[in-house]
């Protein structure tokens, strides 16, 4: 990996892209430590430490919420907006037609995703502020209407700023901007998590530490191995006659299908949805309507049961692996392109049979890939039941995201270097 990065550093365009991404990451971490006025940070951190769900959300956002910074919500509203539109594309035929228009259709859906991010950020910031106001300790020192409106506007603007920054990073083609920002936030929070664990460690936890190391190594090795695995579908191009006695074509190649095409996106989507019910429930736990407050308390109690939480987490990762693969992989288009170029899969007729064959293959690959991702995601939670610490569950998910994002970024950087080497010939 280091050799690839060294070669990439010698290419001016790639080096400039890496420096730009590094500058954006530094700017992101600076904004994450700019607190909003009128907030008691000591009381806020105590409130988050006492709440497991909010503590996990704070770690996932890179500390932006626990600091209550100008980018407190992170990129969560943008991720929620992306999930909504990707679901709508599969449900609404009109949106599906727009997506099939190519780059122009993708830009339209991307524009609508940005627009939906703004009202979602307003709603989520309002919910977060209302939740802080309901805490037993006084976190917000000012409760005036003007102050609340200013807080919501500032936090919403911070989310839009991160969304813009993430898209700028993606344009440099050295990694997905949103994934890299989540990656940077997790890395920034790891030293604090390690120091907290070291401060509370005693010799009786040696088995817990051993299991943690084993899960970490298994996650790294497993993610690297599965991420590199692919199914090669043989493709044969028919010979074509060009002029008198001139033949071209007849080339044998293959179509690579990755075992996990969705990458780390199913994990990010699953975490976002897993946190949503608990956050909403905490918002209504003090409601005056008894049945609503009782329902909120039931949701919180249910989500704290480890086996229920683990099953839901596994199920969401499994479903999102299939869902996101169906969004980015289109067998009909691939079959159509192969037919136009004179290509075919040996033993499979061109057109619809080819598309059906590719769909069957990708479904089988997704079955193993989804089981693997789900198992790696919930394995730390299983060990947490014996170790008795929430840090392991958070650390396992964080490690999975870190490894996947690093692999994805290295591959994109390598592709940029290879492309420019061909251009120089």
Image: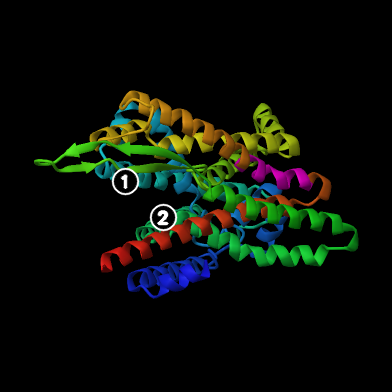
Left or right of 319: which side holds 55?
right
Q: Which residue occupies the foreground of this view, 415 or 256?
A: 256
The Cα–Cα distance between marks 1 and 2, rounded to whole angstroms, is 12 Å
By secondary structure, the bulk of the magenta-drawn segment is best described as: helix
Which residue is tagged 2?
A: 163
Residue at image position (47%, 68%) is 4
Q: Is residue 383 magenta?
A: yes
User: Where 389 falls versus 26 (above or below)?
Assistant: above
Left or right of 70: which side holds 299?
right
Q: Position of residue 302 (x, y in %)?
A: 72, 34
Q: Secondary structure at mark 1?
A: helix
**Looking at the rendering, which quadrant does residue 116 occupy?**
top left
Left or right of 415: which side holds 131?
right
Q: Which residue occupies the foreground of this view, 227 or 45?
A: 227
Q: Earlier in the sequence, mark 1 or mark 2?
A: 1
How dense is the environment of label 1, judged by Cα within 10 Å: few (below 14), some, or many (20 and up)?
Answer: few
How dense is the environment of label 2, judged by Cα within 10 Å: few (below 14), some, or many (20 and up)?
Answer: many
Residue at image position (51%, 46%) is 265
Task: Answer yes or no: is residue 58 visible.
Answer: no
Q: Position of residue 166 (x, y in %)?
A: 41, 57
Q: Secondary structure at mark 2?
A: helix
Residue at image position (59%, 54%) is 60
Residue farthest to the front? 245
**Which contiguous range is marked in magenta?**
373-384
Q: Position of residue 270 (x, y in %)?
A: 57, 41
Residue at image position (52%, 53%) is 73
Residue farthest to the left? 244
Task: Answer yes or no: is residue 290 visible.
Answer: yes
Locate the C terminus by quadrant.
bottom left
Name the disc covering residue 111, or none: 1
Q: Which residue occupies the foreground of this view, 193 or 116?
A: 193
């Amino acid at each position: 990996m280091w050799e690839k990065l060294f070669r990439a550093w010698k290419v001016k365009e790639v080096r400039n892209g890496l420096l730009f991404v590094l500058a954006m990451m530094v700017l992101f971490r600076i904004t994450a430590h700019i607190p909003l006025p009128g907030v008691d940070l000591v009381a806020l951190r105590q409130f988050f430490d006492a709440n497991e769900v909010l503590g996990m959300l704070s770690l996932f956002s890179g500390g932006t919420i626990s600091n209550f910074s100008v980018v407190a919500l992170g990129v969560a509203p943008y991720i929620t907006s992306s999930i909504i539109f990707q679901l709508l594309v599969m449900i609404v035929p009109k949106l599906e037609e727009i997506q099939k228009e190519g780059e122009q259709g993708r830009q339209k859906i991307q524009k609508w995703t940005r627009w939906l991010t703004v009202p979602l950020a307003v709603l989520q910031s309002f919910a977060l502020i209302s939740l802080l106001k309901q805490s037993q300790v006084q976190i917000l020192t000012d409760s005036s209407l003007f102050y609340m409106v200013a807080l919501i506007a500032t936090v919403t603007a911070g989310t839009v700023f991160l969304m813009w920054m993430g898209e700028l990073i993606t344009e440099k083609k050295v990694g997905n901007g949103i994934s890299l920002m989540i990656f940077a936030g997790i890395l920034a929070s790891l030293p604090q998590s390690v120091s907290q664990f070291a401060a509370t460690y005693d010799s009786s936890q040696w088995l817990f530490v051993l299991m943690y190391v084993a899960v970490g190594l298994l996650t790294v090795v497993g993610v690297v191995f599965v991420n590199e695995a692919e199914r090669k579908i043989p493709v044969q191009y028919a010979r074509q006659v060009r002029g008198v006695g001139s033949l071209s074509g007849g080339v044998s190649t293959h179509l690579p299908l990755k075992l996990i095409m969705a990458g780390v996106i199913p994990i990010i989507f699953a975490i976002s949805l897993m946190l949503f019910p608990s956050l909403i429930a905490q918002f209504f736990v003090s409601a005056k309507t008894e049945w609503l407050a009782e329902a909120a308390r039931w949701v919180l109690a249910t989500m704290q049961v480890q086996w229920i939480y683990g099953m839901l987490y596994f199920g969401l990762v499994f479903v999102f692996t299939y869902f996101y693969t169906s969004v980015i992989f289109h067998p009909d288009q691939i079959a159509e392109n192969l037919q136009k170029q004179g290509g075919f899969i040996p033993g499979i007729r061109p057109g619809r049979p080819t598309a059906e064959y590719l769909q069957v293959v990708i479904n089988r690959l997704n079955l193993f890939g989804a089981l693997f991702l789900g198992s790696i995601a919930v394995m730390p939670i299983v060990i947490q039941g014996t170790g008795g610490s929430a840090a392991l569950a958070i650390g396992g998910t964080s490690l999975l995201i870190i490894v996947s994002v690093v692999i994805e970024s290295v591959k994109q950087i390598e592709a940029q270097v290879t492309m420019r080497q061909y251009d120089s010939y």
